[in-house]
Image (spheres, grey):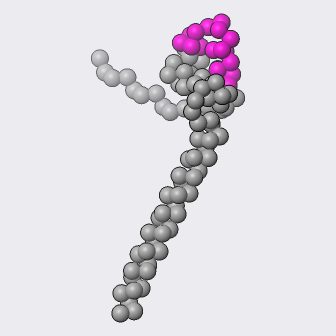
Amino acid sequence: MGKKKPRPRRSFTPEFKAGIVELCRRGDRSVGQVAKDFDLTGTAVRLWIGQAETDAGERDGLASTECEELAALRRENRRLREDVEVLERATAFFAKETR
């Protein structure tokens, strides 16, 4: 038997995720059953539930908005470090030229 092909990566809207989390919180169906009904992985649904609990303050951790802000700050920091590196190289180049 051959290996199963990995499932292509999908993205879901925040509204869809919130709806799935609400279905799980109602308690009518288990997380596994909700995941199966919507062709999702149980791991993804559990992560969405955990993030929803964090966002609601029921669990410790970074809220979604804080995660987005942190990612943006890291991108900006990386860009600024690259800018500094370019300036340092330019300074070294022009320092050689003036000697």
Quarter of the figure with the C terminus: bottom left
Residue 55, percent from left and from top? 65, 31
Give residue 68's quadrant in the image.
top right
Q: Residue at x 53, y 52 (%)?
A: 74
Give residue 66's quadrant in the image.
top right
Res 16 seen here = no
26 part of magenta stretch: yes
Q: Residue at x 48, y 63 (%)?
A: 81
Front position in the image: 13 or 84: 84
Compared with 80, 75 (above or below) is above
Quarter of the figure with the N terminus: top left
Q: Is 45 situated left or right of 82 in this image?
A: right
Res 19 seen here = yes
Front position in the image: 4 or 18: 18
Q: Residue at x 57, y 52 (%)?
A: 73
Q: Is 84 situated left or right of 66 in this image?
A: left
The segment highlighted magenta reads 18-34
Total number of numbered discs in the rendering? 0
- The secondary structure that dominates the magenta segment is helix
Give residue 4's quadrant in the image.
top left
59 part of magenta stretch: no
Residue 33, percent from left and from top? 56, 10
Residue 34, percent from left and from top? 59, 13
Residue 65, percent from left and from top? 65, 40
In the picture as drawn, the residue positioned furthest to the top comes out as: 28
Compared with 75, 95 (above or below) is below
Compared with 27, 70 (above or below) is below
Q: Residue at x 68, y 18 (%)?
A: 22
